[in-house]
Amino acid sequence: MVKTNFPLQIPGVDVEAVELFSDRATLSEQLEQFANLYDQRPFDNTGGIRFDSAFAYCYFLKRITPDVVIESGFWRGFSTWLIDSILPNAELYCLDPVLMMPLNLSTCYRSPRAGYSTQDFSCANFELDPSVQTCAIFDDHQNVAPRIEQSLRYGIQHVLLDDNQYEDTYHTSITHLLKRNDPILPELFSWIDEYYLFPALIPPVMEGCPLEPLWDEMPTRLKHLDREEHFAYSWVTYLRLKPEFIC
Ligand SMILES: C[S@@+](CC[C@H](N)C(=O)[O-])C[C@H]1O[C@@H](n2cnc3c(N)ncnc32)[C@H](O)[C@@H]1O
């Protein structure tokens, strides 16, 4: 049985529909609190998540409250700043093989408490304590099915995906697998307990997204944020992997 807020239809996979955002008062309060944090951002992000996906990260990370976070794909470090701010006590590891090359990334954020590496997640040889909650965050534009297998091998139960997108790109997302009814889906979803896609905050809804936006128009608290600059829906998705498949 997969708990989900997404209309999943996969042969042989039972689903239980979950409504994540029925408590509107709490959601509005969470948005207000997050807007206060966002106002303290170290820079306006480029090449990564914007306000809407950052709010989605915050929503899921506060729900999971992991002890350990592994971030695969950190670029200028905006998402690292976010993780650092939301989970000040979590152990943090940041991976990005591309950054072994000298690049001019403009302003960056690097966490003083994170372990940085240019290894790929697949060969980073994490030795994780199975009794602690670990979350892997993938914003590395790599195919997702191997990432999930690798997470299971490390004993990771919580996975946050950015760019679980419908439109074609150079990595294969779960949404792509669903779009083409890929034969791997029954096996892939047999490893998954919960599958939650974070909806758009405001219209428009992206092609292929089955969820309505959370607000019909820009909430008053966010009116100072330019829509083009601060909003870019990126299909943030949380997966809870089944304990019985965890090594
Ligand atoms: C969209 S950027 C990440 C942005 C960052 N998470 C943010 O929101 O601020 C994608 C990153 O994936 C990195 N990347 C590419 N291949 C990777 C790999 N195999 N493992 C980890 N990161 C990878 C790129 O170098 C780039 O930094």
Image (tube, rainbow, N blue to C red):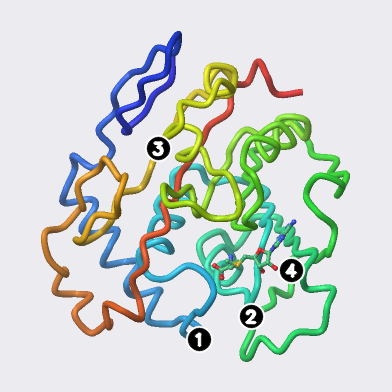
> What is the distance, in whole Å, between disc 4 and disc 1 at their CAs?
20 Å
**Image coordinates for residue 105, horizontal then vertical, percent:** 66, 86
Q: Secondary structure at mark 4?
A: loop
Image point (37%, 67%), residue name: 232
- In this view, the residue in front, 219 or 213, is 213
Instruction: Name the residue that disc number 4 marks.
Output: 113
> What is the distance, in whole Å, between disc 2 and disc 3 at their CAs?
29 Å
Image label count: 4
Tag 2 near tag 1, CB within 8 Å: yes
Q: Residue furthest top?
A: 12
Task: Kindly identify the amino acid type of the residue bearing the numbered disc 4.
Answer: Arg
Query: Crowdedness of circle 2 by 10 Å Cα count: few (<14), some, many (20+)?
Result: some
Question: Does the closest atom of ligand 1 sit within 8 Å of the Cβ of label 1?
Answer: no
Query: Crowdedness of circle 4 by 10 Å Cα count: few (<14), some, many (20+)?
Result: few
Please determine whether, in this image, residue 72 is positioned above or below residue 185. Answer: below
Tag 4 near tag 3, CB within 8 Å: no
Please determine whether, in this image, residue 114 is positioned above or below residue 146. Answer: below
Image point (66%, 42%), residue name: 134
Task: Kindly identify the amino acid type of the residue bearing the numbered disc 2.
Answer: Tyr
Q: Which mark is residue 109?
A: 2
Q: Which mark is residue 196?
A: 3
Q: Secondary structure at mark 3?
A: strand
Please determine whether, in this image, residue 102 is positioned above or below residue 1. Answer: below
**Image coordinates for residue 115, horizontal then vertical, percent:** 80, 63
Of the residues under marks 4 and 1, which one precedes in the sequence? Answer: 1
**Image coordinates for residue 42, horizontal then vertical, percent:** 52, 85
Instruction: Name the residue that disc number 1 marks.
Output: 43
Q: Secondary structure at mark 1?
A: loop
| Residue 126 sits in quarter | top right
